[in-house]
């Protein structure tokens, strides 16, 4: 099967699942009649949002590497904006904030586009981490300086550096896998996002013991085990779109689903610290852009480096 045929088969499968979910959502709404159910309405909002996101991803895939890099660059621009909206910035931070949005983010994605691994892998955590405080200190505002810089640096790590490893998967030179790198993104996103959904389902059906009640009351140990196990089985079943064998795909899925869970938990802790439920309201039924990407934050760089270390020359 060619790369194009694999991609088409995968998207047709996703569309079939979404069509089935839309049918279930319509039936539940019809059964509710004139008595609207908040749960059903939320479900249908989420399904509609997924249709839009799948359409955007499909359009980006049709445009190739440039389309995917641009899609994620724009998405993470809004994610960074959502993150920094919850931080306490001052007038003295304006130069540093402008540099983050209009210099650091574009440069990081340009480095990925030209496949300069030696620089994009250290650009943010080394050079930007050193230069950002210098830019900020030139404004001579020392009020809560350390706190402000730490928040901006953490925002860059989460929204620019870590998530940039999703499109960076396109730069991997895997023997016998040329032209299929887009499918690695599909594998990562499908497995991690499926784990989120399945953890919620298993938690609702069997959840009894909370993992971290003060951070995320909906997360239970039963949901975690059920969601990770079932999403890992899904990852093993998707081995045919990856350069991995079935056991390798299953193992990769275990790693990224666990990282997705704990990454989401860390991001929930930040939201609770700021007293908000969602990062934003950009996506109906889903919250903000960062609410949809939070579970990928920790998973993406680890998945990239595991694949690069074990499967490239």
Image (spheres, rainbow, N blue to C red):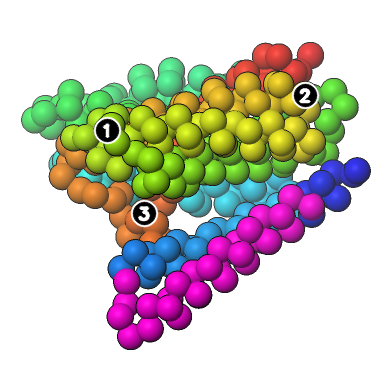
Q: CA distance from mark 2 to mark 1?
A: 35 Å
Residue 68 falls left or right of residue 223:
right
Q: Quadrant of the N terminus?
A: top right
Q: Earlier in the sequence, mark 3 or mark 1?
A: 1
Q: To which quarter of the image does residue 288 belong?
A: bottom left
Residue to which mark 3 is pinned: 288
Q: Nearer the viewer, mark 3 or mark 2?
A: 2
Residue to which mark 1 is pinned: 210
Q: Nearer the viewer, mark 3 or mark 1?
A: 1
Magenta region includes residue 34:
yes
Give the x, y percent position of residue 88. 16, 41
Residue located at (30% from left, 80% from top): 35
Residue located at (79% from left, 14% from top): 313
Residue to which mark 2 is pinned: 245
Give the x, y percent position of residue 67. 66, 52
Q: To which quarter of the image does residue 270 belong?
A: top left
Q: Residue furthest bottom?
A: 34
Label 3 secondary element? loop
Residue located at (62% from left, 24% from top): 252
Residue 312 falls left or right of residue 203:
right
Q: CA distance from mark 3 to mark 1?
A: 25 Å
Asked if marks 2 and 1 touch (Cβ < 8 Å), the reply is: no
Residue located at (90% from left, 44% from top): 2
Which span of residues is magenta-colored?
9-37
Q: Report crowding for label 1: few under 14, some 14 to 19, many 20 or more residues within 10 A (C-alpha).
A: some
Residue 103, compared with residue 308, is above or below; it is below
Q: Report crowding for label 2: few under 14, some 14 to 19, many 20 or more residues within 10 A (C-alpha).
A: few
Query: For the stretch drawn in magenta, what is the main secondary structure?
Result: helix
Residue 274, compared with residue 142, is above or below; it is below
Label 2 secondary element? loop
Magenta region includes residue 82:
no
């Amino acid at each position: 099967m060619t790369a194009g045929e694999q991609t088409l088969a995968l998207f047709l499968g996703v569309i079939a699942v979404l069509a089935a979910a839309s049918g279930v959502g319509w039936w539940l709404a019809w059964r509710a009649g004139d008595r609207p159910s908040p749960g059903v309405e939320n479900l249908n909002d989420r399904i509609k949002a997924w249709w839009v996101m799948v359409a955007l991803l499909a359009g980006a895939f049709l445009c190739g590497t440039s389309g995917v890099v641009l899609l994620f660059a724009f998405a993470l621009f809004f994610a960074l904006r959502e993150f920094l909206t919850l931080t306490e910035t001052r007038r003295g931070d304006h130069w540093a904030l402008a540099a983050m949005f209009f210099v650091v983010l574009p440069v990081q994605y340009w480095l990925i586009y030209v496949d300069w691994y030696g620089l994009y892998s250290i650009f943010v955590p080394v050079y930007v981490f050193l230069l950002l405080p210098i830019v900020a200190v030139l404004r001579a505002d020392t009020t809560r300086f350390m706190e402000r810089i730490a928040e901006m640096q953490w925002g860059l790590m989460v929204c620019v550096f870590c998530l940039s490893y999703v499109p960076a998967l396109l730069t991997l030179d895997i023997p016998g896998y040329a032209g299929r790198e887009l499918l690695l993104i599909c594998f990562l996103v499908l497995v991690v996002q499926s784990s989120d959904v399945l953890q919620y389902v298993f938690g609702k059906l069997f959840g009894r013991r909370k993992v971290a009640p003060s951070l995320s009351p909906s997360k239970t140990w039963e949901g975690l085990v059920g969601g990770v196990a079932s999403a890992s089985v899904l990852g093993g079943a998707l081995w045919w779109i990856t350069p991995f064998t079935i056991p390798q795909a299953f193992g990769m899925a275990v790693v990224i689903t666990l990282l997705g869970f704990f990454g989401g938990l860390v991001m929930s802790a930040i939201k609770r610290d700021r007293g908000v439920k969602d990062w934003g309201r950009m996506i109906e039924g889903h919250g903000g852009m960062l609410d949809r990407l939070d579970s990928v934050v920790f998973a993406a760089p680890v998945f990239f480096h595991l694949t690069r270390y074990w499967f490239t020359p």
